[in-house]
Amino acid sequence: MLDRRSILKTALAAGAMSVWDAPVRFAFASVPTDRRFVVVILRGALDGLAAAPPYGDPDYKSVRGALALDTTGTNALHDLDGHFGLHPALTNMKAMWDAKELVVFQNISSPYRDRSHFDGQNVLETGGTGPHVLGDGWLNRALKPMGLANGDGALAIAASPPLMLSGSGKVSSWMPSVMPQPDAAFLQRVRALYAGDPILGASLDRAIDTEAKADAAMDDKPKTPEQMAQRVGSYGDLTPLFTGAGKLLARDDGPRIAVLDASGWDTHVNEGAGDGQLARRLRALDAGLDAMKTALGPAWKKTAVVMATEFGRTAAPNGNGGTDHGTAGAAFLLGGAVQGGTVRAEWVGLKPSALKDGRDQPPQTDMRVLFKSVLADHMGVSRRDLDGTVFPDSGGVAPAGALFAA
Amino acid sequence: MSLEGAIAAHRFGLGARPGEIEAAAAAPRAWLLRQLDSPADQPQPLDGGAPFQPGGVLVSALIQYRKDREAEKAQASAAMPAPDPVKLFFKTFVAAYTREMAARFALGFTSEKPFAERLVWFWSNHFTVSALNPAAITFVGAFEREAIRPNIAGSFEDMLLAVTRHPAMQLYLDNAQSIGPDSLAGKFTGKGINENLGRELMELHTLGVDGGYTQADVIALAKILTGWSIDRDGGPATGFRYYPARHEPGDIVLRGKTYNGGEDAGIAALKDLAHDPATARHIAMKFAVQFIADDPPPASVARLEKNFLQSGGDLRALAETAVNDPAAWKPGRGKMRSPVEYTAAAMRLLGWPRGGDEDKQVKGVMAATRMMGEFPLAAPSPKGWPDNSDAWSGPDALLNRIQWAKELGNRLPQSFDAVAIADAGLGPLLQADTRAAMKSSASPGDAMALLVASPEFQRR
């Protein structure tokens, strides 16, 4: 629990006019829902056939070649349903599967059909039918119908919000920092200078508000440089970000929506199978998810996490033991609120005739089905809002159903 | 004081050093363009030690390093384990990168040709190679020295060729390992092409994503560029080598035109891409966004595009077109500075160096800049660092900047005239309320922190 009075007392005792007294932002408003929704954007195009291998497919071994995962031994994949599995590095996700808290989607993709990372991410984040059709993010457009557009409701774990969460709805951003704590009196004076600035004033208000909540949420407030470094983590370590997100989301007055970025999936060279480059990255992601679950505590039961990537990769390895840009791939829905333990795949096999352009996983399910399912059945957004403003003109794309307990 | 002098120093340069606005004031456009008359400066080692090494020497060094590690591994036993290769890599190649970036930061603080330096930063980011890629980190410093700096006022075609051949790009976008499947090496090893460079070269470096190419063209360009690689024998100084045995033989059709002829096919394809109208459009837009506005006037973009096409990609002429564009001199709120631009502007404002431990100061700025979300030659993707105000003004990003401004102020001496520095450094760009707030500050350090945090200093 945040003790706002103690912050006030400290600030006033220091002889400074407290920034909390300013007409900047005052109360931490109560939020209209206790449901949590987290999106993890896997930038760089995750290899879906590595993350959720269709090892029961008769062509799996021949198509994947050196990238095929073992079904026995030290680096054996985790079996899910006798046909699909999970990459051996995803042990915590396997535990979620066993607890019926994980749904795996295969052959899923956004409406984007070309192979540019940046256009692909644009479509994934805007929710448009093509790149640059829409200028703001679908999750931002969903804030209003969720009643979360006042700035307290949504948080990007980033220096600046990514496109998915950018738009007219107010959001905040936060990252674990090693910078010294802001001095309230100084911030107040800077805030006064920002009064006439169209961007900076509002942005600083959000920052001050979120930082206060984060300070209160972090019980392990770093004191020494070593502790500070630990809080930020080493390069590639996702747990500080996921832990921070979990702790903020867990608060009664915390955000209900969070977006995290996890990049490093563009495995053109030496991708590796059960061990290697991709395995290390998946292990970091898996550890991050577990850290977030721990930090959420009881709020995990109210939480749905979506992990999505801009597109998949080629089914077969390229000339360098890696994979090139493809079309469809895998996505994941997990969390205590999810009714899981299933794989959703319109599986058509891995024969060249089944693959898109003879090379990519075919796009059988629209990514918006997954996004809409969470927004409709977990966050209570109406079909009218979903088909009209959140994903404009998408009436033909219906939520999947049966992903959450009725 | 001259408004145009101040705009020249801030919008086209890196922020004014003491006296800079006066120097620019008489003829701001000429002051900017004069900076392109001589080659761009090269960063110099701050420790006065060995000069930074050419890309070709670094290729040899890296190959030798790998051989040494393999030999150690072969000789290792349980009693005498081989040294940790990761630690050794950090001690040598990562440390060399950091040393060179320190020099690059310091050059930004002190450069007397700040417009030329801005152009270097712009083109380095356009042709992103990133130290986040362990294969490329050894070469990214050499890349900027060898492929970017000599070409900022030359031709786009020359820069494109230098960039594409450089070991940093060959390794960063995986072309060094791309092999034509029907080449001798392809038939012998069963290995094939890697599409990465072929795609990004058209999408990011030349035509732009809507510039008119298909997946078949991506594969075609990748095939055309097979054989282009790093020199595995560590031969000539460039570090580049063309291997005919890896080159895909036969006719290759790229965007309707047939290329055939080994290395020359690649050179011809790059030249065609460099002079394509779509490339002119793509470069004009990026240039206008960098120097004019997030959402630049279409007429400005059109002028740059026309100039690029007519001049055959003359980059000095392109810079001149931007400098002579009235829209670039519009007073009022400019774009947010990126973190690298922001910290450099603050150090220039203070007239760095002013004594103390310079090495420590530069390292402190480097760490703070990274914290704010940007680091030179280390972008998270081949698209490079973003160039729009929204990317750098998010709540957490902004708070980091303000915290740094305060820390910077805390480290300044107890007595100096902060308002005089503000007047000299910003001229007419300094806002009345900022000046008043500085005057009522408890210490000059606090006043300076307010100035660095102020909206006019966040922007350029």
Image: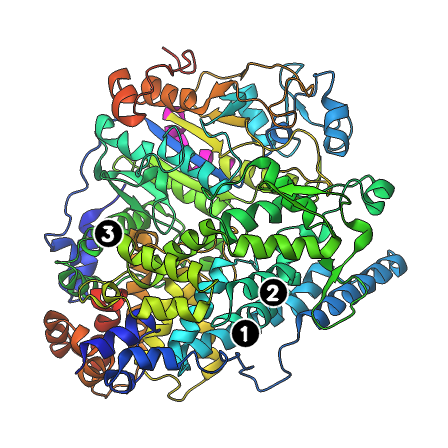
- Percent across and percent down for residue A136 are 30, 38
Element type at marker 3? helix
Identify the mark at residue A203; answer none if there is no mark.
Answer: 3
Identify the mark at residue B150; answer none if there is no mark.
Answer: 1
Element type at marker 1? helix
Tell me how far mark 3 sits from mark 2, CA to CA. 41 Å
Exactly how many numbered labels are in the figure?
A: 3
Pointers 2 and 1 in contact (C-beta within 8 Å): yes
- Badge 1 amino acid: Pro
Element type at marker 2? helix
Chain letter belonging to callout 2: B
Tell me how far mark 2 sits from mark 1, CA to CA. 10 Å
Mark 2 highlights which residue? B162
Task: Establish if B266 lies above or below B57.
Answer: above
Task: Establish if B77 lies above or below B21.
Answer: above
Task: Please tell me which residue lies in front, B353 or A62.
Answer: A62
The answer to whether residue A187 is left or right of residue B64 is left
Marks 1, 3 in one chain: no
